[in-house]
Image: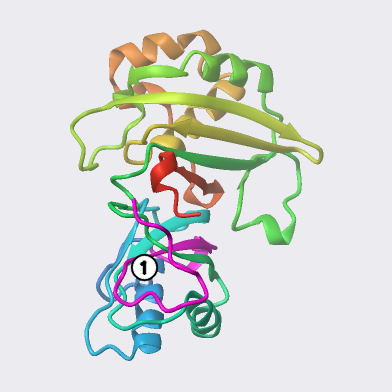
Amino acid sequence: MSTPADPSEPTALRPLVLGVAYDGSAYEGWQLQPDRPTVQGEIERALGVIHGSRFRVAVVGSSRTDAGVHALAQVACYRPPSPRPPRTLMAGLAKLLPAAIRVLAVAPAPEGFHPCRSAVGKTYRYRIVNRPLLLPFERHWAWHLRAPLDVAAMRQAAAALVGRHDFSSFATAGGPRRDRVRDLRRLDVLVSPGGVIEIEARADGFLYRMVRNLAGYLVEVGRGRIAAGRSGEILAARDRALAGKTAPARGLCLVGVDYPPGLRPW
């Protein structure tokens, strides 16, 4: 691996890695879509202005978050059509991007880096507000459930799902991957003061809507509609219909992407 460039100097045509945070409420997800607002589309538009490019400045992301899903640490990469110092890019992007999207870091890409293929793990957090009233600023960032949930039962069900399994029962149809085996390294149910419950999931990768399906399942357990001891049975059945409804997108946030030591951009 080559020595990283001085971040204060122009990087010529070397690929650059972006660390991105966004409120996904007004967007149709990360992935570029014709005639629809997406996070990728906004970033590509802003980079095109900064570089003065007549052509699309293509940006590749680490995760294709759904419509309404948020991110604290999305990772993206692009090859600049003209040299710009990272500090200049940061300043330009802060001016050109909507307030709901912010680029928090820019760095030269390590040799061989790809934001998706190089990733060895991802962490998502699903937020639930479990009290009678939802505060106005929480409405786009949490699933509001008024009736108390049985957190102990949710934790029991979650613990049985941790490990390497076929997660077909928690994958929504339409995903691009046929291999449904994933290593779910953590599935924690965390409780904070004020009736906030967060489901944190970390794995080597996730299937289409897998985290939202896991969250929906654990809520059904917390409501007493599915017995906590059925996790193994539902995994083995490989039947999406047994695991309850998909949780709403607004409670989900991508909080981290893991890379091997030699491919960490920062």
For image coordinates 55% across by 79% down, the residue present is: 94
Pinpoint residue 174: horizontal percent, then vertical percent.
22, 42
Residue at 47% over, 49% down: 249
Q: How is the image coloured?
A: rainbow
Q: Report the span colored magenta.
A: 1-29
Query: Is 227 placed left or right of 170 in the picture?
Result: right
Residue 200 appears in the figure: yes
Q: Is residue 114 above or below residue 155?
A: below
Residue for point 51% across, 46% down: 256
Residue corresponding to mark 1: 40
- Location of residue 46 (image quadrant): bottom left
Q: Residues within 10 Å of mark 1 (few under 14, many from 20)?
A: many
Q: Please say whether residue 246 is visible from this viewpoint.
A: no
Q: Is residue 27 magenta?
A: yes
Q: Residue furthest front?
A: 3
Q: Is residue 219 above or below residue 103?
A: above
Q: Where is residue 192 drawn, in percent x and y? A: 76, 36
- Magenta segment main secondary structure: loop
Image quadrant assignment for residue 243: top left
140 relative to 142, above or below: below
Q: Position of residue 133 (x, y in %)?
A: 76, 48
Pick the front one: 21 or 156 = 21
Name the amino acid, label 1: Gln
Residue drawn at the location 31% of the way across and 83% of the way down:
82
Q: Nearer the viewer, residue 76 or 175?
A: 76
Instruction: Look at the image and say whether residue 69 sits in the magenta stretch.
Output: no
Q: Label 1's element?
A: helix
**x and y percentages locating residue 156 in the rendered image:** 59, 14
